[in-house]
Amino acid sequence: MTFEPLGLSADLIRMVAEEGYTEPTPVQAAAIPHVLAGRDVLAAAQTGTGKTAAFVLPILDRLRKHANTSFSPARHPVRALILVPTRELAMQVDDSVHTYGRTVPLRPTVVFGGVPIEPQTKELRAGVEILVATPGRLLDHVGQKTVNLGQVEILVLDEADRMLDMGFLPDIQKIIALLPARRQNLMFSATFSDDILRLSGSILRDPATVEVAARNIAAESVRQLVYPVDRDRKEALLAHLIAKEDWRQVLVFTRTKIGASRLASYLDRRGLEAVAIHSDRTQPERTRALEGFKAGDIRVLVATDVAARGLDIEDLPHVVNFELPWQAQDYIHRIGRTGRAGATGDAVSLVSIDETDLLRGVQRLLKQAIPWTVEEGFVPDRNAEPQPLRGGPPEGRPSRGHHYAHRNAGRPHSGSGARH
């Protein structure tokens, strides 16, 4: 299938082709006609499925009639509001609007926290039609009366499930109260959880439902492998694997901010260029880290789940679970960052005995056993006492104290055997 039957304008199809895309992804093929028709949409689509273009392209077409080159701010009211949970995702969506909208004279801008507010205020006061925003910073601008949402025609909630996870529901409700009652609403979420369905029921009117990715399914293009290892040897094993296999562009997940910083420092001291990215880093630091990682100057990016959500890195070849997540569903999100767009990728998990129950939960969710292998020189001590998990509470989660596993909790399931 091509983009032509979806109903987009010829110039937008040309912009898509110039970016190297000739066939729409499933979420684009399903959602774009509904958005062009003015319908509300509830879509289940994870990062990496092409969901951003699924709403950016038809929004550009729908707002085209308002395009003008007037210098008057009054001629450029906010007509599309795109709410996203993280600064990184805000920048990526704004970049897509600029990229695909080169032929459409609409003014887009992006506002998010962690950076000075004055440059954002200047752009808003000059007038913008398409505004990408994180909820907190948008409410800052509302409080300073630097933005008016009274003429918004289209509202997008992108990664709505993550916004709920991060506690943004009160902010979202405040923002929606400022919008016109008559508007088009688009909601994109990785899953249709009960919370998401409740939120959609309060916002969407007779929505078209788009569900393109089966829930709890890992992409077949991702090769999964578990390395059983003693907890106190995880850092050394990771450094060994990166050097031995000559991995480049490795995204490593930890549960805690302090754990991310410690691991990045450990790897960096061993000559493996590594940087941690989490909510305690300033926005310029996070931006530099991401740009360095994409450019190949930084070999390893160590991140928490909260910080990594919204990072859209093309052709990411390696994802490592330095620690398994508390929620098995987050494992799906993590490994979904590799093996995209027909490419293959590796998802490696370093599992200590105290994480055995977490691994079982992941395998139950996947409905399959994950192959495992033991690296020579890192054979775990079967008689070792399980050790408490190190570090503070996971980012975005309350402290739950030390977690111990029983000594006889069992070994990781071998599945179909080690991959050689």
Image: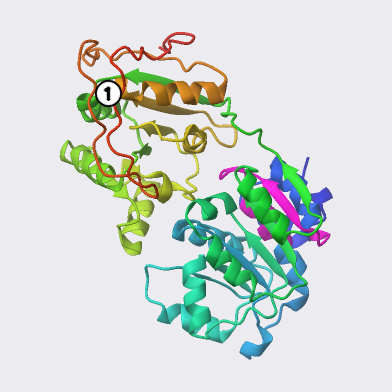
Q: Could you say which is closer to the camera, residue 337 or residue 257?
A: 257
Q: Left or right? Give the position of 175 relative to 114.
A: right
Q: Residue drawn 60% across and 78% down?
A: 128
Residues in magenta? Answer: 36-58
Disc 1 residue type? Lys
- Is the residue 12 above or below the residue 343 in the image? below
Question: At which x and y percent is residue 60?
Answer: 70, 65
**Snapshot colouring:** rainbow
Q: Residue drawn 55% across and 32% down?
A: 343
What residue is shown with label 1? 244
Q: Quadrant of the C terminus?
A: top left
Q: Residue drawn 56% across and 59% down?
A: 93
Q: Left or right? Give the position of 165 relative to 231.
A: right
Q: Residue drawn 48% across and 37% down?
A: 330
Q: Left or right? Give the position of 52 relative to 184.
A: left
- Is the residue 176 above or below the residue 265 in the image? below
Q: Quadrant of the N terminus?
A: top right
- Is the residue 271 above or below the residue 293 in the image? above
- Is the residue 224 above or below the residue 253 in the image? above
The answer, for residue 352, to whether it is visible in the render is: no
